[in-house]
Amino acid sequence: MKRRNFIKYSGAITASGLILPSSFASVLVPKAKDKLGIALVGLGYYSTDLLAPGLQFTDHCELKGIVSGSPDKIAKWMSKYNLKDTNIYNYSNFDSIANNQEIDVIYIVLPPSMHREYTERAAAAGKHVWCEKPMAPTAADCQAMIDACNKNKVSLAIGYRMQHEPQTQLIQKWAKERPFGKIKSLTAKAGYRENRTDHWKQKKAMGGGVMGDMGVYPLNAVRYVTGLEPVSVTAKASTTRPEIYKEVEETMNFELEFPGGLVASCEASFGKNQNTIDVQCKKGWYKIEPFQAYSGAEITTSDKRNFKEKLKHQQAKQMDDDAMAIKNNKPMAVPGEEGLKDMRVVDAIYKSAASGREVKI
């Protein structure tokens, strides 16, 4: 139907008191996207083995584009995921993604030293940002990322996948309800043996060191277990393999003091396998082991209960939750401010490790 005839026809219907059927009206009113288009920036292990496969299980978002400096990887990804030529970018032409209406969200999966730059560029392009943890090497970087997203009126979420996981959400609920009474003490340990010798995790300039990777797991965990923010820290860095960890720490031990005097003992390491949180309370205890596995967390309690509900795919749940928040204009479950809170503590941890003294946060 020609536009002028349609206007005349629809006006006559309106005047007569009749209502256009919804199927007819949808031709006139643009329909919101069923799925948000995601572009992954950085095609390393996490994107290749976890995020891209996870996007095959999502209901509210889908893989639409990639950003990579590796032509070999690009060819493989285009073939595997049927990606359009127009949705392929490298680090030089990245900013032109602003003109691509199929890309709604840019997911940054790069070494921490690059998170700030690409968050700021993505925000300037008018795209929502999802950024892997740790958010950035310093709290100042994190604040700049938040400011950039606020300025450009886009959302920012940090990839703390465990906060989208059912057992972790139960622990967060217990932080408020205290079913075992007041917490008396807690420990949190995360680590694995990292044997690579030429990786960003061993390079200070790229945000390496265990606090630039595994360190945020026990740190973030004791914050959501207690529901409190630490007020001071005492930390000690160590390395058992100086031939590999020349520039950065292999292991970090740190004690966080919370309001009221509660102390959390934490360890993060690239030298040992560990994955546990132990919470001692006035009326019992609970233990989460593992607390940050891809298969899910598992809780055992002093009253002999066990919680181990598993998700089909953790990263899919995380991305769907964040996509729904964008679609419904709701706050992110884990916004940039959460990453900033962790990095304020990390800044203090490094100061304490360097000085050998307690540092106030």
Image (spheres, grey):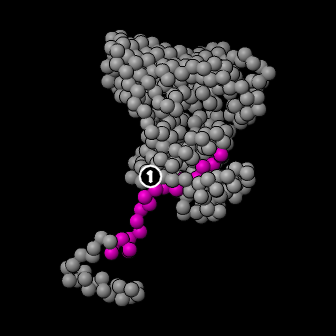
Q: 10 Å neighbourhood of mark 1: few (<14), some, or many (≥20)? A: many
The amino acid marked with disc number 1 is His
Relative to 125, does residue 253 appear above or below in the rendering? Answer: above
Nearest to the observer: residue 226 or residue 55:
55
Query: Can you give x and y, in whole percent of width and height, for residue 193 in the image?
Result: 66, 23
Total numbered circles:
1
Taking the image as drawn, is residue 326 in sight?
no
203 displayed left or right of 139: right
Query: Can you give x and y, in whole percent of width and height, for residue 227 in the image?
Result: 41, 26
Q: Residue furthest right?
A: 243
Query: Can you give x and y, in whole percent of width and height, for residue 187 in the image?
Result: 50, 16
Taking the image as drawn, is residue 215 in sight?
yes
Q: In this picture, which residue range is highlighted in magenta?
A: 24-43
Instruction: Write down the residue under mark 1.
Output: 60
Please give the name of the residue rendered at 60% of the width and 23% of the height, measured from the top-left corner: 191
Asked if the stretch drawn in magenta spans residue 40, the answer is yes
